[in-house]
Amino acid sequence: MDGIINVLPDSIANQIAAGEVVQRPASVVKELLENAIDAGSSKIKLIIKDAGKSLIQVIDNGCGMSEMDARLCFERHATSKIKEVKDIFNIHTKGFRGEALASIAAVAHVELQTKRREKELGTKIQIEGSRFITNEATACTDGTNFCVKNLFYNTPARRNFLKSNGVETKHIVEEFQRVALAHPDIRFEFIHNEQEVFILPSANRKKRVLDVLGKKMEKSLINVEIETSVVKIRGFIADPKTAVKSRGDQYFFVNDRYIKSPFFHHAISKGYDQLLPPGTYPKYFLFFELDPHTVDINIHPTKTEIKFQYEKEIYAILVSAVKETLGKNNMVPSIDFENPEPIDMGLGITPESLKQPTITINPNYNPFQSRKPASSGNYSYGKSSVLKGESWETLQQIQKEFDQGDVVNQEADIHRQEEMKQEDALSKSEKENPEIAPVYQSIQIANSYIITSMKSGMIVIDQNKAHQRILFERFQSAYSEQSIQVQKLMFPEAVEVPTELHQLLEDQLENIRALGLELDKFGKNEFVVNGVPSGVPQLHYQKLVDEILEELNHGENLKGNFIQEKLATIFARNTALKKGTYLNTAEIQNLIDELFSCATPNFAPNGKPTFITFTTEDLFKKFN
Ligand code: ADP
Ligand code: MG
């Protein structure tokens, strides 16, 4: 009786095991959908509420379970899919570990109704935290109906660990899309908070890809089909012109199971070779069929990473399959990356119905005219552009103040000290003779940089970065004072938002509107821009929204001020003066004045310098 080892009761063991299988609502969605597929269903319906936090329901018309199986399925290692060790190497089903339902039932309220076709009555089981509550005969339809409620109700630490509804919904939609893409013959429905997200009728592979990811891809999909002794590869790769800056829409399926494989991704990119602009990812949907004996899907609990016996061979096959496919489709000759063809938005808008640029233009708009002085603001812009000498005094004053706060890097500090020494030496006579007012000249180089002299040298300003800084601070202060003015668009402009990101974007609409972009949900699946911050010329709405989405999607923990700052950065970047824009003298001066009345003139919002300085000493050294 002196032993200290206990065998854990099943309920606790299951709860621990659940940590591996059930990480978030999307994991439950994946397991239930896969079970429905393994049951041979031809119709599967997914219903969720509150990003799956309060309800995940999967209804199928598959084989159903007998009364005995309905009870057994919640036991750990209860599976109908393998019987002997050798079966593990010949898997044709999604599941086989027999862990999923035991794990889910350990951390949620589960209700199961299931009936085999040949039976008159079905079975209803309720189970909470592994405890059976009900087990009775019931009248129900053929197939299985799983309800998972209040996920993680008994593991608050896990519940608190869940992300916002937007993020959790994104994961669910992604899982759903992967399963739906792998099984085009099955009809799927997906309802979230009583609204349809997807209705996907049974279809061929191509139609399914288009139904899931949008018709706009239709013209850019290129058929891939190759059969070798180790693998059969079918599916589609997309025209390199549709390659995108962020990852997404890269799909590999092995025997209809979605997998992740950086190794094969590399092979695809290599196949595209020089055709991809740097830093972009091609889209692809590739289905591998191979002998289950040559893959090991057992290495990862959620089975998205698998081992291949003929990995190197498949890599080589992929590279040449992609190359050949692109070659056959004449994708290889020079492609103009500078001017990619505009992509069809796929929103049911025909070219004829498209309206010309839809901004209502304010003829008096001047991008350099500030609506209000920056926060530090004792400086008057209107005046300062006339009083050139004085504005430079102002600049130097600001510079000094700024440098005293240790915001600037050391190198700049050293420059500054040297500058001041020089200044002292050079301007003795000036100071003694106040009549001689210095005149500072500014010129624009290559329509991109502004060079201007200062007392003790010169400054080179990057006009785009400088303008980003100015606009960034302007957006920020207007945001905090809620004084952004919105210019309504005469014709609202539709923008495309991938389904998995709808909720993420919806959650941020308030913040986005506060920055002056009136973005609204329109109908079930569309977002439209109804208004823009006034005085913002040439805004490319889709690009702006894409960048916002990228931030929402990949920046974690976006809250309050932080999201506002990110959005202001994106807005500034999208609306700033471009390189190559000619500026006249007054505009140049305005830009300089506004830059140096910013709270942080030295850096663009992305942290890059807005200007660099050369002291007379630097110049002297260059010549000696
Ligand atoms: P696995 O899928 O690895 O076998 P699960 O815990 O997911 O393990 O499921 C356990 C068993 O319950 C399955 O093997 C299957 O026999 C049965 N089952 C689960 N879901 C369904 C369903 N929707 N229809 C019919 N049988 C099901
Ligand atoms: Mg399963």
Image (cartoon, rainbow, N blue to C red):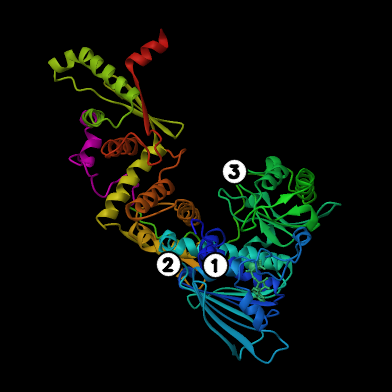
Which of discs 1 and 2 lies nearer the camera? The answer is: 1
Helix, strand, or loop for circle 2? strand
User: Which comes sooner in the sequence, label 2 or label 3?
Assistant: 3
Toward the top, the furthest residue is 624
Which of discs 3 and 1 lies nearer the camera? The answer is: 1
Q: Position of residue 444 (x, y in %)?
A: 40, 31
Look at the image and say whether residue 542 sits in the magenta stretch. Answer: no
Q: Is residue 375 found left or right of 272 in the rendered image?
A: left
Q: CA distance from mark 1 to mark 2?
A: 49 Å
Residue 10 circle label: 1
Residue 520 circle label: 2
**Type of amino acid at the residue the image marks with label 1:** Asp
Q: CA distance from mark 2 to mark 3?
A: 31 Å
Do we see residue 583 in this rendering? no
Tell me where the magenta segment starts and ends, as one range: 365-394
Dot 2 beta carbon under 8 Å from ligand 1: no
**Type of amino acid at the residue the image marks with label 3:** Glu
- Residue at the (24%, 15%) spot, across then down: 421
Helix, strand, or loop for circle 3? loop
Q: Nearer the viewer, residue 555 or 224?
A: 555
